[in-house]
Image: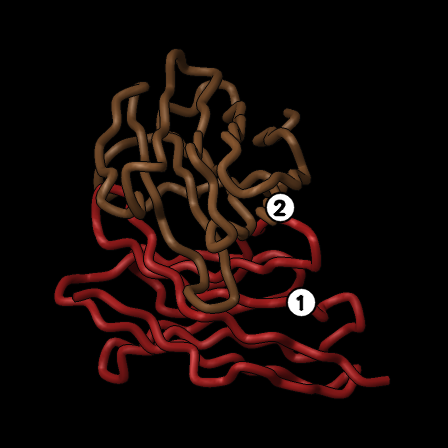
Chain colours: A brown, B red
Amino acid sequence: DAGVIQSPRHEVTEMGQEVTLRCKPISGHNSLFWYRQTMMRGLELLIYFNNNVPIDDSGMPEDRFSAKMPNASFSTLKIQPSEPRDSAVYFCASSSGLAGGGETQYFGPGTRLLVL
Amino acid sequence: AQSVTQPDIHITVSEGASLELRCNYSYGATPYLFWYVQSPGQGLQLLLKYFSGDTLVQGIKGFEAEFKRSQSSFNLRKPSVHWSDAAEYFCAVNTGFQKLVFGTGTRLLVSP
C-alpha cells in the first residue's frame, strides 16, 4: 500500500494568496484527519471526517480555513487568504473505524507551508 | 480536559545505553494510549499502543511501554538504543471518537 499521500510536500506562498493542500487516504480507511504542527503549539487536530462527513471541526483556527472531502479517496484543506502565522507543517492521517476504538492513525509525510 | 505531558523536551543517550521516555496523561476514563516517532522531515509512525489487558506493550523497533494506572503514566523504554533511534517521540491519548491529543514531544539525541 502506498500509505497516505499528501501534496505538495512543500509550498511557499505570499501573504494573501490561497493555498490548497491535498490528501489521499489509505484505500479502505473511512476516517481522515488534518493536523497542524508548529513549534509553539505542537500537533493540533484541525478537523476530522468519517465516511466523508466532517465530524469535528472545532480545531479549525478561523474562517480562513476550510476542508472538504468530496469522496473517500480525496480531501483538501484550503487557506484563503493565507497569513504568515499559518506557516507550519500540515499532516493528513487516515484510519479505519469510527468511535472510541482507538484505531491506529496512519500519517502522511506532511506539507511544509511557508507564508511570506 | 484531556491532556498529555511529556516532561523531557530533550534527552541525550549514549548508543547502546537504555532509554526511558516519560509520559503522563490526564483522562477520566480508561485511556487508549499511543507512542509515535517522527524522524526529521517525516510523518509520524506508530511505535505501539495500549487499549486494555497486559499493561506491558511491545512495539516495533524493540520498543516497549508500560501502562501504570496508579501513576497515570505510559513510559516508553528500549534496552539498547541505536543511532537510528534519534528522532522525536510523541505520546498521545485517544479521547474518544478517534480524537488524539498529543504531548509536546521529546527529542532523542544519541551520542556515539
Image depth: mark 1 or mark 2 in front? 2
Residue B26: % across, % down: 23, 72
Tally of marks? 2
User: Is disc 1 in contact with disc 2, using a CB cutoff of under 8 Å?
Assistant: no
At 22% from the left edge and 44% from the top edge, which residue is drawn? Answer: A58
Outermost residue to the left:
B28
A41 vs B83, nearest the viewer: A41
Q: Position of residue B9 (x, y in %)?
A: 53, 81
Q: Residue at coordinates 37% horizontally, 59% vertically from top-left? A: B50
Q: Farthest residue to the right: give it.
A: B112
Residue occupying image coordinates x 32% and y 19%: A52
Is residue A113 placed above or below B5 in the rendered structure?
above
* Residue identifier under label 2: A112
User: Which residue position is annotated with label 1?
Assistant: B87
Q: Is residue A113 left or right of residue A100?
A: right
User: Dividing the image into 4 quarters, which one contains the N terminus of chain A?
Assistant: top right
Closer to us: A8 or B38? A8
Does B18 appear above or below A58? below
Return the residue found at the far top: A71
* Residue A47 shown left or right of residue B82 in the figure: left
Say what secondary structure mark 1 lies in: strand
Quick one: B59 or A13, which is closer to the camera?
A: A13
Q: Which mark is residue B77?
A: none
Please give the chain letter of the residue carrying mark 1: B
Q: Is B44 located above or below residue B77 in the figure?
A: above
Q: Residues within 10 Å of mark 2 (few under 14, many from 20)?
A: many
Q: Amino acid at mark 2?
A: Arg
Identified at 36% across, 28% down, the residue is A67
Instruction: Residue A13: name its quadrant.
Output: top right
